[in-house]
Image: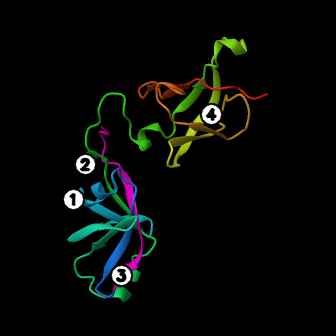
Amino acid sequence: MPSDDKQLVIGKITGSYGVKGWVKVHSYTDPQENFLRFEQCSLRRNGGFEPIEFDAGRAHGKGLIAHIPGVDDRTMAETYRGLEVSAPATELPALDSGEFYWSQLEGLRVWCRSPAELGVSEPALLGKVDYLLETGANDVLVIAACEGSIDNRERLIPYLPGDVVTGVDLEAGTIEVSWFLED
């Protein structure tokens, strides 16, 4: 579990819902309803964080809807459109061994140990994790070139632990993958 007081984005307000001040929320949590369990939420606005509270919320369609105390009409709710909602990293639940939060993987250097049949014996630095994508089938690491990487290419590598991703070492700041190096 992250041990600092860093704020992590857990969702985004995408618009208003109805005429009584409810907002639509796109949750980045899994499952999405976990968004409603956070107690110390903040909005990122004007370059800083300000506290926000949700006094009600529920799943609706493919997303969530929530109510902010004191926001009781559609016009007020619309002022929250596009704002990110964050929570302290310390509020995140502990994970099982071998599980990681996306924020823990971002910035790690990605080393490739190609399959032996390619004749590559030395690990190659592909770059560092810029961000992750959720595709439905599996998450994808977006690898950006960094100092010392083998080239300047961006790579998309499926995040498949035990198959493609063969190791994650947070202390060393590395991820090892079994991936084919392109010519």
Q: Residue 39: percent from the left, percent from the top?
A: 21, 59
The type of residue carrying mark 3 is: Ala
On-image quarter of the N terminus: top left
Whether label 1 touches label 2, CB < 8 Å = yes
Residue identifier under label 2? 91
Q: Are marks 4 and 2 in contact (CB under 8 Å)?
A: no
User: Mark 1 or 3 closer to N-term?
Assistant: 1
> Does label 1 or label 2 sit earlier along the sequence?
1
Q: Judging from the image, what secondary structure is the residue with disc 4 in?
A: strand
Q: CA distance from mark 4 to mark 1?
A: 36 Å
Residue at position x 64%, y 17% from top?
115
User: Disc 4 to disc 2, how far (Cα)?
Assistant: 30 Å
User: Pointer 1: what residue?
Assistant: 39
Which numbered mark, 3 or 4, is in the foreground of this view? 3
> Could you say where residue 58 lies in the image, as x and y percent from the top left?
27, 67
Q: Alpha-carbon distance for marks 3 and 4?
A: 41 Å
For the residue pair 3 and 56, the one nearer the viewer reads as: 56
Residue 5 visible here: yes
Q: Which residues lie in the magenta part? A: 1-18
Residue bearing the label numbered 4:
127
Instruction: Give x and y (percent) for residue 18.
Output: 34, 84
Residue under label 3:
77
Q: Earlier in the sequence, mark 4 or mark 1?
A: 1
Q: Along the polypeptide, which appears first: circle 3 or circle 2?
A: 3
Which is nearer the eye, 120 or 61? 61
Is 22 rendered above or below residue 85?
Answer: below
**Mark 4 vs mark 2: which is more N-terminal?**
2
- Proximity of marks 3 and 2: CB atoms separated by less than 8 Å: no
The answer to if 36 sits in the magenta stretch is no
User: Percent x, y for residue 78?
Assistant: 40, 82
Tell me if mark 4 has few (under 14), some (14-19) or many (20+) residues whose alpha carbon lies within 10 angstroms of its own.
many
